[in-house]
Amino acid sequence: MKVLLTGHNGYIGSVLTPMLKAHGHEVVGLDTNYFKRCLFVGELTEVPGFDTDVRTLDGVELEGFDAVIHLAGLSNDPLGDYRPTLTEEINQQASVALAKRAKAAGVPRFLFASSCSNYGAAGADFLDEQASFNPVTPYGVSKVNVEKALNQLADDSFSPTYLRASTAYGVSPLLRFDLVINNLTAWAITTGRVFIKSDGTPWRPMVHVEDIACAYIAVLEAQRSVVHNQAFNVGVTTENYQVRELADIVQDIVPGCKVEYAPDAGPDPRCYRVDCNKIARTLHGFKPQWTVERGIEQLYQAYRDVGLTLEEFEGERYKRIAHIKHLVEDGLLDDHLHWR
């Protein structure tokens, strides 16, 4: 298939791009490239593409594509809280506009990067795709609203699918330290502390970045009737953990470290436990390969190989909100996050 992949130079996109090519798909990328200078390991897979803000799509023609995989957006809750109106503009309004443009151009499939953060403050019960939405952040609200809008666009000619990813972790060329497992492992290796900023009680479903990429490929290659206007929780049901359990696993794997809680640690309202049986039952091409334990071992080895320091870990290079603020302060981005 000929696929337009937005956000191809991001944490997930930089893993998904070479995997799509390996499966024989023709990939065209679209990215604002906020984070292209933040390479952690390896190199980015070069594909034809557009250095374009998804809000403008200048010069981008969608005719001839078989699918759009839409990853681009402000990628987490801290970025969403930074300027909530921008999260609405980029994650919501631009996503819906892209979908409408794709439909008008005759693109038959649209894979949307949704999130299990849609469920928000949900407690400890297992939630399947029929569970109520209860987002507690601008990021989560944006994902819910896009799903609702795409549902209204779905018809015989336009088939959206919503991939609600669990919390990602694992090594990527464009690594992020603002993800819980990546973060806790980095604390452990750079300071000897597995530092938890909440009370450790919230539940989180976890999924490796490579398994997320596999889910997109499985949806892309599935029969339309199987995935048409369907939501899928992306992950494995057995890979739900409380944050304190994740910290204990890091402590077991990284030698000489100890779990430590912030003095003012309190409960995090974002708490959800997710049932991923639908994707396992429906998409036979989706076979997750990673567990949290293996992922932490992978991160530990990667951090050792690059000689990760506390200065790098706590710096702006690998934290999305810090890097965006750095680009604004340096005058490279304006207040609306457009390149100057």
Image (cartoon, grey):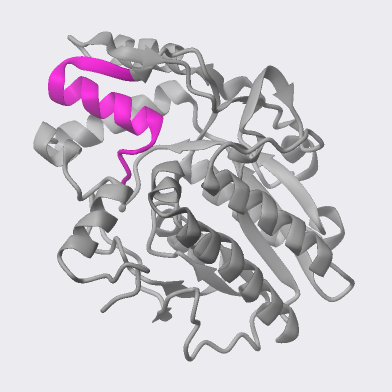
List x then y, in percent, for residue 122: 66, 25
Q: Image quadrant of residue 97?
A: bottom right
Q: Image quadrant of residue 63?
A: bottom right
Look at the image and say whether residue 179 sits in the magenta stretch: yes
Q: Would residue 64 be seen by someone viewing this image from the given angle?
A: yes
Q: Nearer the viewer, residue 20 or 171?
A: 171
Look at the image and say whether residue 173 sits in the magenta stretch: no
Q: Is residue 79 left or right of residue 232?
A: left
Q: Is residue 175 above or below residue 60?
A: above
Q: Nearer the viewer, residue 299 or 175?
A: 175
Q: Nearer the viewer, residue 255 or 22?
A: 255
Q: Is residue 98 left or right of residue 30?
A: right
Numbered label tally: 0
Q: Image quadrant of residue 48?
A: bottom left
Q: Quadrant of the C terminus?
A: bottom left
List x then y, in percent, for residue 113: 59, 54
Give the extent of the magenta segment. 175-196
Q: Is residue 9 left or right of residue 262?
A: right
List x then y, in percent, for residue 138: 53, 47
Give the residue at x 60% y 53%.
142
List x then y, in percent, for residue 204: 54, 25
Give the residue at x 38% y 28%.
181
Q: Would residue 114 be seen by someone viewing this image from the given angle?
A: no
Q: Quadrant of the N terminus?
A: bottom right
Q: Is residue 233 left or right of residue 225?
A: left
Q: Is residue 259 above or below residue 198?
A: above
